[in-house]
Image (cartoon, rainbow, N blue to C red):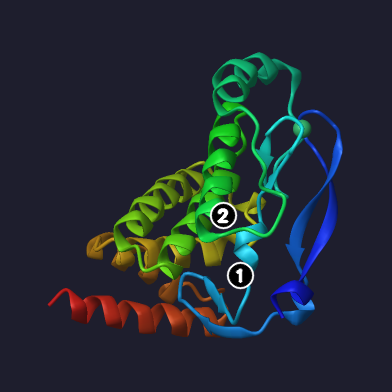
Amino acid sequence: MAIDILYDRDITCLYCGKTFKTKRIRNSKLIVKKRDPDFCVHYEGENPYYYNISVCPYCSYAFSGSFSPVREQYKAALEEDYFQKVGSVELCGERTHQEAVRSYKLALVCGSIVHEPRYVMAGIFLRLAWLHRFQGDTAEEKKALAKALELYNLVYEHGEHDKYSMGEHRLIYLLGELNGRLDKIDEARRWFNMVISDRSVEPALKNTARERWNEYKNKGQ
Ligand SMILES: [Zn+2]
């Protein structure tokens, strides 16, 4: 099953422009086990999140599908602060948990050097948190969740939600959920209330926000 579900995909490097093959998961073969309230999906067998980041075998540039081609102005900084330090990296095959985590960490370094937008970086931190969750590593999960929360707060503050693929309501809900997971109960209440009291929010999301808030509220007592 593990062999069947993985396939080689051609990806073009956003830095050097060379094309390489890297593993991906066939979505049609995925079986959902459960969904967490912060949109994390648990699957049976192979984990598609392991393969979200492509790492170029020629230059080691690491990027997600949301990254943009590298602009000229960042190339010198990448050379000095990334390529020279990281050396050659081979992450195009089947990945272990550690290799998946490494691919995310490399993408975070590259993304910060080339100034990928906050919502892109937040999404990587959130998925990195989920990787740690799958392993039961709560301390590392919380560190990554805290970074995701910090960035999603800025996305909201700067009115960048229109770029956020989940839309404004889901972003506000997610801010409530991430605060709750990080035991920031007052903040969680503020965001969940925004979802619950907004008439234009879809009823399903509103109900989930209500349920989550009840859970966090009771935990805090
Ligand atoms: Zn490359």
Image vertical order of residue 137 relative to residue 67, above or below: below
Q: Does residue 119 appear anywhere in the picture?
A: no
The disc, 1 or 2, on the residue closer to the chain's N-terminal end is 1
Q: Is residue 124 left or right of residue 63?
A: left
- Kindly identify which residue carries mark 2: 100
Q: Quadrant of the N terminus?
A: bottom right
Type of amino acid at the residue the image marks with label 1: Asn
Q: Which residue does the image show at 36% across and 68% down from the upper left?
A: 136
Q: Which residue does the image show at 24% across and 63% down from the upper left?
A: 183
Q: Is residue 14 left or right of residue 142?
A: right
Return the residue found at the far left: 221
Whole-Å distance between the Cαs marked 1 and 2?
10 Å
Tell me if the residue at label 2 has its CB under 8 Å from ligand 1: no
Image vertical order of residue 24 relative to residue 122, above or below: below
- Kindly identify which residue carries mark 1: 47
Cβ atoms under marks 1 and 2 closer than 8 Å: yes
Q: Write down which quadrant ligand 1 falls in.
A: top right
Q: Quadrant of the C terminus?
A: bottom left
Give the label on residue 156, or none.
none
Q: Is residue 170 left or right of residue 65?
A: left
Q: Does residue 174 appear anywhere in the picture?
A: yes
Give the x, y percent position of residue 14: 78, 35
Examine the image and state in which quarter residue 31 appears: bottom right
Q: Which residue does the image show at 66% across and 47% down from the upper left?
A: 91
User: Is residue 50 or residue 188 the one in the foreground?
Assistant: 50
Image vertical order of residue 81 relative to residue 7, above or below: above
Give the x, y percent position of residue 79: 64, 18
Give the x, y percent position of residue 84: 59, 19
Under circle 1, the secondary element is loop
Type of amino acid at the residue the image marks with label 2: Ala
